[in-house]
Image (cartoon, rainbow, N blue to C red):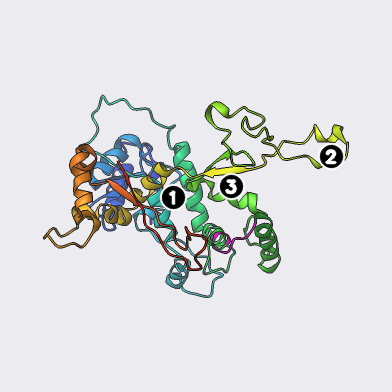
Amino acid sequence: MDKSWMKKQRGSMEYIEGVLNFVEFASEHASDGKIFCPCTKCVNLCLVPPGVAREHLWRKGMLQSYTHWKWHGELADVPTATKCGSSHVQDSLEQYGDFHGMLHDLCPTHEMPPEPMEEGERVQEPAEGQPTDGAQKFYNMIDDVDKLLYASCTKFSIFSAIVVLFQLKTLCGWTNKSFTMLLQVLMDMLPSDAKLPKDHYEAKKIVRDLGLGYEKIHACPNDCMLFWKENVNLEACPCCKISRWKTNEASVTGNNASSSKGKKKAAKILRWFPLKPRLQRLFLSPDLASSMKWHVNGRTVDGVMRHPANSDAWKMFDSTHLQFSSDPRNVRLGLAADGFNPFGILSTTHSTWPVMLVP
């Protein structure tokens, strides 16, 4: 497919005709009548009607680094060294999940107004042909999704291999050290051109931009308090007087000189996973967002008890908090304690479902 028009001057007949051909090609793979706009302002992060994308490309120019139109229906090039057909390679790469779709769900897309931009509109734009910092991180992850783990690999890209390994690490309770040891063994097993990271730290840096991290908060070794907010600078717990730091073995043996050089390590750490970003992440995926709003948009209201939304408690909460209940994205969280035994004298476990309403 001819892409030489991308480097032509805006306003030239070659550039205008190239934009028309591109929009026509992209419209054949449009999602709900909209396409990602690859202009230098939107950098493939905005879903717009094809006509708006055409106007943006004429006014703002095409993103020069976007030479493989992966978001507009162009298939990825597969190395000739593979023995399988291209369709088989693509199907194999999707065996462990749709990683392209996952990344687009994680990167918020903004609906643009259907009318073209006015001539006098002034917006802060990135440098000509250059993506923003957030978009560049997104493209880096996309590149890792497209790059095969090694030349003849048909099942994994760099990104999918790391994500799958991290998933196994979580499910099986591997330590960071064991994860690093596994990566080193895999590097010896795989071909020399394999692009796996060398250790857990390098692997974590690659997937860090996926977000949903956590915050470390130091805690009293005896669980008296958290060293947080107004207590963040305390050196010891005011209740039990225990130091917040681990005892340095060197100081115990009398080597005070070496003990003063090392970095202090907290004796106990609480890992706080903020709730709001995780709820927001659920609404970034179109499929999950539909399910999250099902109790408003998809539920059958016929007087039959089929869902907690039909209960008197739910209805009473809605009538009390009108502003919250009027938004179809309102969420109620049910907390489960599977296998928890609240009574020590019992030998059996059971599940409890206390409900917490979150306005």
Q: In the rendered image, which quarter contains the C terminus?
A: top left
Amino acid type shown at disc 3: Lys
Residue 126 in the image, given as x and y percentages of width and height: 42, 32
Residue for badge 3: 205
Residue 66 in the image, given as x and y percentages of width and height: 43, 47
- Label 1 crowd bin: few (<14), some (14–19), many (20+), radius 10 Å: few
Residue 224 in the image, given as x and y percentages of width and height: 58, 38
Q: Secondary structure at mark 3?
A: helix
Front-most of 5 and 60?
60
- Extreme residue toward the front, this view: 345
The question of residue 293 being in magenta is answered with no
Q: CA distance from mark 3 to mark 2?
A: 36 Å
Q: Nearer the viewer, mark 3 or mark 1?
A: 3
- Label 2 crowd bin: few (<14), some (14–19), many (20+), radius 10 Å: few
Q: Which residue appears at 19% of the width and 46% of the height?
A: 316
Residue for badge 2: 252
Decide which of tag 1 and tag 2 comes sooner along the chain: 1
Front-most of 102 and 156?
102
Q: Which residue appears at 52% of the width and 69% of the height?
A: 154
The answer to whether residue 224 is seen in the rendering is: yes
Location of residue 124 (image quadrant): top left
Q: Which residue appears at 44% of the width and 63% of the height?
A: 97
Q: Nearer the viewer, mark 3 or mark 2?
A: 2
Q: Which residues are magenta?
A: 169-175
Q: Nearer the viewer, mark 1 or mark 2?
A: 2
Amino acid type shown at disc 2: Val
Instruction: Say if mark 3 contacts mark 1, CB within 8 Å.
Output: no
Q: Which residue appears at 26% of the width and 58% of the height?
A: 28
Amino acid type shown at disc 1: Thr
- Extreme residue toward the bottom, this view: 83
Residue for badge 1: 67
